[in-house]
Amino acid sequence: MEENHDSTENPQQSQGQNKAMKCGWLRKQGGFVKTWHTRWFVLKGDQLYYFKDEDETKPLGTIFLPGNRVLEHPCNEESPGKFLFEVVPGGNRERMTANHESYLLMASSQNDMEDWVRSIRRVIWGPFGGGIFGQKLEDTVRYEKRYGNRLAPMLVEQCVDFIRQRGLKEEGLFRLPGQANLVKELQDAFDCGEKPSFDSNTDVHTVASLLKLYLRELPEPVIPYAKYEDFLSCAKLLSKEEEAVSRCIYFWKRSCLGFVSVFSICPFICKPSFGPRLGCFPPCQVVT
């Protein structure tokens, strides 16, 4: 039985679904009767609305997200093709609503499931410094300024410091993959607002893979599309006098947070002095 257990604003009123963070088809398991129903979901504000059809204006129900958690279910070899995730109650609560202990949802693919989980985590954990994978760089830096004046996300600084200390002589840096399970665990921890630390047992390739994953999932490249031509113009000044270069750096500090915040603390990017054994990060990969 579907229910509309919340009297919040209809997400299709006034502003419409085009203001939603994410929308799409998912399958939802019922509360009392565990049957599956295909529903149109809209993530807007701090709630997840679900409708019988894409054109409906009245939601069948809403899922209130703040204070709750979202979990990925590992793929089951006995039931391939089921890409499951679940919104579960947070804190000491045992149920989401009177009709639902939790909300079990099924996406059409692994990528779609992961995208939904990231988007929902951004809503749940964004106010607490989480949900940073896939979040705008300036939003992350703006939140983290409360912990001190910095130009780059703490994740980037932490990864770069670790690689500087332990990885500059490592063969295949940024080329060899890290431990996929550990990369996933670290990503989930950062997305949940935690600040996991790296110790002496942490593999440098895992940290490098985590950094690459973070940069790859930014909504825009480190150098934004709107600033790309300006960047090329500034790059041409690098062979000219020092004063011109200083003006270029000042311009980028004023106009392109993404470039300065990441690129300026990554001196190991394509640095020739590291030698041919290092699979360093080509600048073209960072830009694009």
Image (cartoon, grey):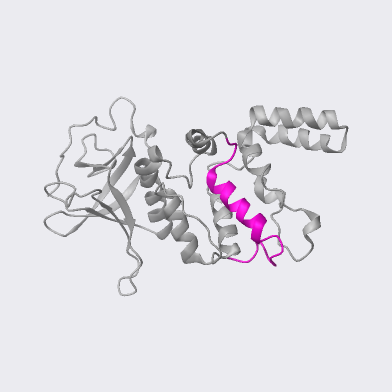
x, y percent for residue 5: 15, 39
Residue 271 location (% of width, % of height): 77, 53
What is the quadrant of residue 122 in the picture? Answer: top left
Position of 198 compared to 168: left or right? left
Q: Please state the horizontal and vertical placement of residue 68, each as a whole percent of the image.
A: 27, 46
Single out the residue that lies furthest toward the front: 200
Q: Nearer the viewer, residue 169 or 17?
A: 169
* Image coords of residue 176 (percent x, y): 63, 66
Q: Is residue 20 left or right of residue 40?
A: right
Taking depth in this image into account, of 165 and 122 the one nearest to the observer is 165
Residue segment shown in magenta:
150-177
Q: Is residue 286 left or right of residue 125?
A: right
Residue 243, picture quadrant: top right
Question: Closest to the observer: 196 or 28?
Answer: 196
Instruction: Give the residue at x 35% y 67%.
Output: 75
For the point 47% across and 35% down, the residue is 143
Q: Is residue 101 visible to the viewer in this orientation of the structure?
A: yes
Count of marks placed on residues: 0
In the rendered image, residue 160 lying in the magenta stretch gets the answer: yes
Quadrant assignment, res 278: bottom right
Outermost residue toward the top in this view: 14
Q: Is residue 49 magenta?
A: no
Which residue is pictured at 77% across the width and 27% down the height? 247
Q: In this rendering, does residue 174 appear at all?
A: no
- The single residue placed furthest to the bottom in the displayed view is 78
